Image: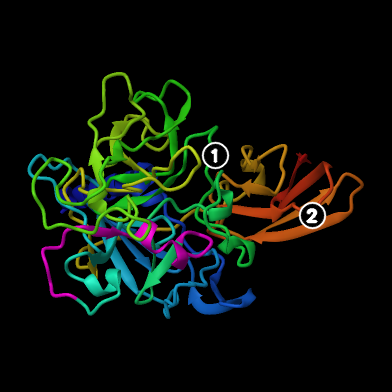
Amino acid sequence: MKKTALLLAFMSSGVMAMAQTNPAILSWLQNRSGITGRHYVSGVPTPIVDADSANVQTVLYSSNWVYVRTKGIPAYITGPFLDGNPSIASNQNAIFKISLNPVQNTGTPTSTTGGNIGIFINGVAMFDYRDGVSWKNSTGALAGGPLGGMGDGVWNRDAVVAEKGGFDCSKGHPAMGNYHHHQNPSAFNLDRTVISTICNVYTADALYAIDSTRHSPLLGFAYDGFPVYGAYAYKNIDGTGGIVRMKSSYTLRSITTRTTYAGGGSVTPGPAVSMTYPLGLFREDYQYNPTTTGTPDYLDDHNGRFCVTPEYPLGTYAYFCTVDANWNSAYPYMIGPTYYGVRNAQKVTSITETVTPYVTPTTGVTSINELPSVNIFPNPAADYIAVQLNNLTYENVAIELYDITGRLQQKTTLYQGSTIAYFDTKTLYNGDYVVKIMSSAGVVSQRVSILR
């Protein structure tokens, strides 16, 4: 009896120790403030407050698995979707089971599929490049004619290119209510070259803001259990070399007709390259270029690499949300077209093993005084000021912008589970301003300049 009790105590202490160290347990944005989702309706630039709670609801874990309960609703405002998508972000009532011990797949790589391929830390779905339409199996949707039959599924359309007009400010949209991102989840108007004007009217933030000076945060986990990071990381895999942009090893092919695969194999012909069907509209328009010696910032064919990260100081395989030099999304965007590891995550209806709840702490990490690396950028600013908190926040945070005489110019709220807020500064005069970030723990102030 004593031996059994000791064994159970040892197992329990081992599981508890795991919760203190495993980022797949620690990193989720749990809803601790009761915040609900919000969405825009087309033509109305004031968001509607929804009934469904945002972010992750609960996190439970065993020795091998973490279970994430989520409604799939982000804290940032969703919508509108101006391509005629009638759906809005709605409650998915999901439990995702993700491995705490991911392993490399040493056999044939598993392809990503349509639908969920991973989960962001706020419980929102991660999709791959595709939008479910290919040239042969849905010709009507592409060519304006009657729908074609179920073909061979080649010339698969790239959602990031084809559905750009239907993404909201946060670069997301819903499929049958399942709100998701196909790409780097940073707001359009924070890119160096802005390719969508949706944020001009329907202001929103996103899961994070790109910052070229520091390692990007952990954004989520793929269905093989390996972490997904933002666009910037340590140059070298051992954590040295400064911060650089992680680069995709996929490039567009030099073709004018679509009659072969990148490897030269024959394929059912697709439409010729044209303004209607531009290069990059289809996944098969890309070719993989094997990384070369001496270029550790180029990723492998799964869009990742084995490296040291802030959360994994001993190293892990990690995917990265690739962008180009203008911070516009770069294929294959997050994961793919195949997984590095064994895909073993699944959406379950119930939990059938003994689990321990993990509750994010309400002391220490929530104190503004524990956030010495509040990022305010660009500085000097021109058209906008972005305010990013690099630690997780478990309460709503008020942010105010004052001129140098102390007059309030603008104010906003960074909601629990968000990481970024920003001010539109196009109408403000050149000069120095003060940003104040306020919570129950205190106030942090930083100076920023506006210069055009």
Q: Quadrant of residue 311?
A: top left
Q: Tell me, for residue 211, which label it has, or none.
A: 1
Residue 90 percent location from the top left of the image: 42, 77
Residue 11 percent location from the top left of the image: 23, 48
| Count of marks placed on residues | 2
- Mark 1 vs mark 2: which is more N-terminal? 1
Nearest to the observer: residue 9 or residue 313:
313
The amino acid sitting under disc 2 is: Thr
Q: Tell me, for residue 31, which label it has, or none.
A: none
Residue 369 percent location from the top left of the image: 67, 43
| Horizontal side, residue 357 vs residue 104: left or right | right
The residue wearing badge 2 is: 427
For mark 2, give the secondary structure: loop
Residue 322 percent location from the top left of the image: 39, 43
- In reply to whether residue 155 is colored magenta, the answer given is yes
Discs 1/2, front: 2
The boundaries of the magenta stretch are 148-171
| Horizontal side, residue 145 vs residue 269: left or right | right
Q: Quadrant of residue 211?
A: top right
Vertically, is 327 above or below 393?
A: above
- In reply to whether residue 91 is colored magenta, the answer given is no
The amino acid sitting under disc 1 is: Asp
